[in-house]
Amino acid sequence: MLAQTFFIAAGLLAVIAALGMLVSRSPVRSALWLILVMLCVAGLYMTLSAEFIAVVQVLVYAGAIMVLFLFVIMLLNLGALPNLERVDFKKGVGFVLGTVILAQLVYITATASEPLATASFDPVETGSALRIAEELFTRYALPFEIIGILLLVATVGAVMLAKRTFE
Amino acid sequence: MEIPLTWYLTLSAVLFSIGVMGVLFRSNLIVILMSVELMLNAVNLTLIAFSQFMGDITGQILVFFVISVAAAEAAVGLAIVIAIFRNKLTVDVNDIKLFRH
């Protein structure tokens, strides 16, 4: 019962914060709403007893990535959008497409047959750092190394892109 | 633990749809990038939920990799935003018409 109450509270807060990100005019406010979404999602990871991923979520997403976003917003000195948000063709199409995707996903979830309905959560199988590390450094050692190379390439690429002057 | 799997999937669907609408609604490049991050978060929630309900740790490994790639994507994406802003002095996608003639 307590877990369900926590899920409903965190889930509602996440949806409200996501909508806040969608409608707020200033990019800084959008970023702050998104940080709230990520903290709520980290709380939901805790209800799934995925502690390691929850901590990584707070450290990397809410910490590093969102600070990078805020840093760029402040570097570019972007205020609130000057032009009024007007309802046009593009927004209508966006709303319809988003609603259709939501309807499809909810329909699939609602009509899912046996395997989904009878799935049971075994709390003994925890996502502790020990279990993840065992898998990560044995079976998935090669992808782990490739991710390291990818991050290096991304770092070099980001520096080159931001430094270079075109024309 | 008495939270059903369908609750997680439904919440994740709602968050993903809000992310889709953010990409299609907003004209600010940085907000569009943030909406992409929101969609990645929704998918991560699905992966973790399935991973725990199936008792298979592989989903969490995949989420770990998704977070790493998202970090790289954010760094490169924001660098591109800075490069565009230097040239055009705007981050509005309606004003960026490099390929439109």
Image (cartoon, helix red, strand yellow):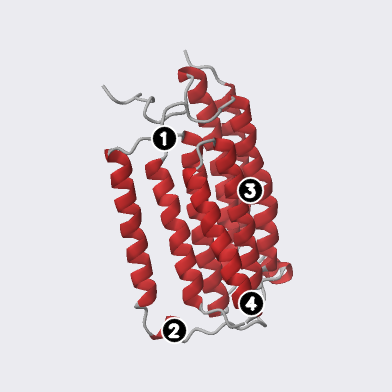
Quadrant containing the N terminus of chain A is bottom right
The residue under the point 45% across, 68% down is: B10
Name the chain under label 2.
A
Residues at discs 2 and 4 both on one chain: yes
The reply to whether discs 2 and 4 touch (Cβ–Cβ < 8 Å) is no
Q: Which residue bears the numbered disc 3?
A: A148
Residues at discs 2 and 1 both on one chain: no
For label 2, the crowd category at 10 Å Cα-Cα, with few meaning under 14, some 14 to 19 and many 20 or more, is some
For label 1, the crowd category at 10 Å Cα-Cα, with few meaning under 14, some 14 to 19 and many 20 or more, is some
Q: Report the disc number at residue A117.
A: 2
For label 4, the crowd category at 10 Å Cα-Cα, with few meaning under 14, some 14 to 19 and many 20 or more, is some
Q: Position of residue B60 (x, y in %)?
A: 59, 66
The residue under the point 36% across, 29% down is: B94
Q: CA distance from mark 4 to mark 1?
A: 39 Å
Q: Which residue bears the numbered disc 1?
A: B27
Horizontal side of residue A130 vs B3, given as left or right: right
Q: CA distance from mark 2 to mark 4?
A: 19 Å
Numbered disc 4: secondary structure: helix
For label 3, the crowd category at 10 Å Cα-Cα, with few meaning under 14, some 14 to 19 and many 20 or more, is some
Q: Is residue B55 above or below residue A45?
A: below
